[in-house]
Image (cartoon, rainbow, N blue to C red):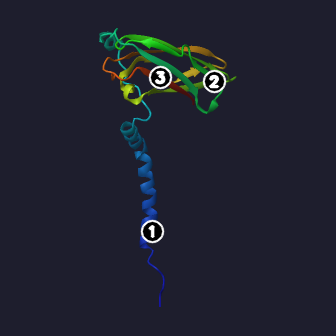
Amino acid sequence: MDTRKPMGPLVLKLFLVPILMFGFGYLMVPLYDVFCDLTGINGKTGDAISTAQAQQMEAETTRELKLEFVASVNQDGPWEFRPSHTSMVIHPGQTYTATYYARNLRDIPATTQAIPSVSPAKAAPHLNKTECFCFTEQKFKANEMREMPVTFVVDSNIPEDVDTLTLSYTLFTK
């Protein structure tokens, strides 16, 4: 009497598991974006707009918002990174420029990328940048320091209950 089980189902499972794992890994970024949109986590800023588009916005001078600036370095890298000012009072529809200071503390060149985040999440789509050091990688020479500008406008459609926004950058070393 033969007591061996057929190998077909086991082979099928061993074949399908890697395919499903690859598919799940491939879908992680779109799934994460959907999750963030639904929950309001990872407050991505509004779209990059042109200077001309920013100039066409009408300033709402009767309304003031406080914009706070925060900077951090991923994994405590050998960088000095901070905003030049910790906050400013702004009017929706008006263009502003703020600067962040960065310094490579290494004795070798390094490339960085800054990732922005805005809170509260419902205000994030209303913060639009015309120029930002976060748009491209930043290459630093050994021990180089520089000020990096971000030019932005908060559109007038920002919810009325928002009176303080926080623009945060995390600096990642590549």
Q: Quick one: 164 or 70, which is closer to the camera?
A: 164
Q: Quick one: 52 or 46, which is closer to the camera?
A: 46
Quarter residue 19 falls in: bottom left
The three-letter code of the residue at mark 3 reads Leu
x and y, in percent, of residue 141 in the image: 63, 19
- Residue at 45% from the left image edge and 48% from the top image edge: 25
Which residue lies under the disc numbered 2? 79
The first of marks 2 and 1 along the sequence is: 1
The first of marks 1 and 3 along the sequence is: 1
Q: Answer yes or no: is residue 136 visible.
A: no
Judged from the image, the secondary structure of the residue bearing numbered disc 2 is strand
In this view, which residue lies farthest toward the bottom?
Answer: 1
The three-letter code of the residue at mark 2 reads Trp
In contact (CB < 8 Å): disc 2 and disc 3: no
Give the crowd class for mark 2: few <14, some 14-19, many >=20 residues within 10 Å. Answer: many
Judged from the image, the secondary structure of the residue bearing numbered disc 3 is strand
x and y, in percent, of residue 55 in the image: 33, 9
Q: Answer yes or no: is residue 88 visible.
A: yes
Which residue lies under the disc numbered 3? 167
Which residue lies under the disc numbered 1? 11
Closer to viewer: mark 2 or mark 3: 3
Quarter residue 60 falls in: top left
The first of marks 2 and 3 along the sequence is: 2
In contact (CB < 8 Å): disc 1 and disc 3: no
Q: CA distance from mark 2 to mark 1?
A: 51 Å
In the rendered view, does 145 fall on the left or right side of 6?
A: right
Give the crowd class for mark 1: few <14, some 14-19, many >=20 residues within 10 Å. Answer: few
Closer to viewer: mark 1 or mark 3: 3
Q: Quadrant of the C terminus?
A: top right
